[in-house]
Amino acid sequence: MNILRRELRASWRTLLAWSLIIGLMSVMMMALFPAMMGTTQDLEEFIKLFPPEMVKAFGMDRMSFGEPMGFFGTEVYIIVILTGSIFAALLGSGILAKEEDDKTVEFLLAKPVSRSSVLGQKILAFVLVLLAFNLVVAMSNFLGFALFVKEPYSAATLALLSAAPFFAHLTFASLGFLSALFWTRRRAAYSVSIGVAIGTWAIGLISLISDKLAALRWISPYRYVEAADIYTSGRLEPLNIGLLLLICGAALALALALYRRRDITV
Amino acid sequence: MPAIETVGLRKFYGKARGIEDVSLTVDEGEIFGFIGPNGAGKSTTIRVLLNLIFPTAGEARVLGLDPVTEGRAIRAQIGYLPAEVGYYEDMTVRSLLEYSAGFYGMDAAATRSRINELCGAFELDTKRNTHALSSGNRRKVGIVAALLHRPKLLILDEPTGSLDPLMQARLFEVLGEENRRGTTVFFSSHVLSEVQRFCHRVAIIKDGRVIKVEEVSTLRAGRFQKVRIALTSAERPTLSVAGIVHQQTSPDGQHLELLYNGNINELVRELAQLDLASLSLEEPPLEEVFMHYYETAPADAGPKEA
């Protein structure tokens, strides 16, 4: 567990920065809610100006701005899930790519530890970091509601909306981890994994805007944890979460299988 | 049981050659030198032994174990210094060494005293950040990390690179001590003289093949010298002394360059007959020794005649 401890210590500061900044953003955005609520009518008029596809894409057909959970779902949730996914992509790819990039891999792999254990500990490290990140953000979400929302709201729905991004984050971290086997320079691995995190987001949007491209919907991990779905159903769809976990599992299993037979590249 | 044994070891990266045919045996308790010019395959061989890369063909045994299937058990008994050492940017020398020691299950008190002992010997400041170190100091950290857990076998890839002469001497002192305690030392180098001075045996690798394994006592009988002679006039002398491996005369006949591997007294006596403008002796680069000696001389002629 030497490597795990080392990785947690190394990620500590980044984790603190990302979780506090995103947590703070969640609280600050909720601070805007009371002002928004006063102008609900204008807002609804305003939204009508947009093409219906766009409204649908942002889930505004099923969630209302004028209601706290709807506001959270359309505004805050996007920020948390998207920025968190970028953080996760950086984390997952960097935790592996840095060893070859900094030429520390020869130091590490010359130690009496199996390659599976090296990867296992690194995976555990990024899972724990993402859990901590989402925990801090979840607490910030509740703090924002406690401070600025006077209306009744469902704490259970807020809890679900706070938990759901974790699964998307885990997916992007796992894909980033796998990508670091092919792009062993940190910068390249970052670009690829952030590209995946933002690219699939864009694909998800496009799939909603155009009916012809609706099938693309399933490529985007974000679609499996969409705020409007959770908001309307009041639950996380087990099949969706299962699929995301399956992608994670497949990516990590592939990374493990490849890494065990791999030549170091420095 | 030999400490290291390879038979026909081969590693290709696609079509690019790493090593072609490396067969050698390092006995337990030996100090074994592995010399060859840059790109000959020294690091590739070493990396196969540590299972950092996978061999294309051939066999390797380290401490009787197979690097591919029993790599972990091997690495538990090995201290390794990579040719190019990288460190984690947020670590001090001490925290890096403690991290390294942690993999071998050393207890905190033993780790601390061993770190102090070795860092004292190599004059390393343990509070420095590993990223701010000079290349010589980085190498020293790597050496200390390799020695820390008192391994049975030390594998050092170009350990003297970027060390000043004082530290090189210190290194070989420490390695000698470890060796007397029973540690086998296997190190690569491209400097013939250090290998000659400290090893029991050497393997010479060129273009991915081990071309010779020799007792150092044999090598020691002759010392290669690069002799540069400038004459006051264009004499074009013919030197008849034995041991001239290669001779080159400048077009003007005033400058001579010899690769000499014989009795230095005989050479000096011979040169005394000439009217010299200047004379210099230096250690030839290994490549040159190979080029003119190991390639042209029959394998068993060796440098014995000196």
Image (spheres, rainbow, N blue to C red):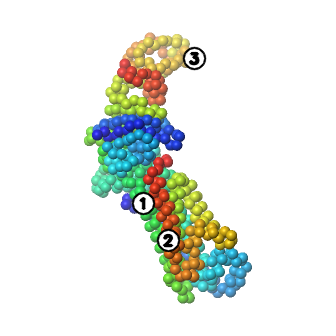
Evaluate if marks 2 and 1 touch, with contact meaning CB atoms under 8 Å apart: no
- Label 2 or label 1, whichever lies nearer to me, is 2
Using the image, name the chain to which the residue with label 2 belongs.
Answer: A
Q: Chain of mark 1?
A: A
Q: In the picture provided, is B114 more to the left or to the right than B288?
A: left
Q: Please state which amino acid type lies under the numbered disc 1.
A: Gly
Quadrant of res B301: top left
Residue located at (41% from left, 52% from top) = A108
User: Which chain does tag 3 point to?
Assistant: B
The extreme right residue here reads A49
Indicate the secondary structure of the residue bearing disc 3. loop
Disc 2: which residue: A242
Question: Looking at the picture, do discs 2 and 1 lie on one chain?
Answer: yes
Q: Quadrant of the N terminus of chain B?
A: top left
Residue B119 in view in this figure: no
- Please name whichever residue, A127 or B227, is drawn nearer the observer in this view of the structure: A127
Amino acid at the residue labelled 3: Pro
Q: Residue at x 42, y 43 (%)?
A: B48
In the image, A49: left or right of B17?
right
The mark closer to the camera, 2 or 3, is 2
The residue carrying pointer 1 sits among few (fewer than 14), some (14 to 19) or many (20 or more) residues within 10 Å by Cα, namely some
Q: Is residue A143 above or below residue B287?
A: below
Return the residue at label 3.
B251
Q: Which residue is mark 1?
A: A120
- Helix, strand or loop status at disc 2: helix
Numbered label attached to residue B1: none
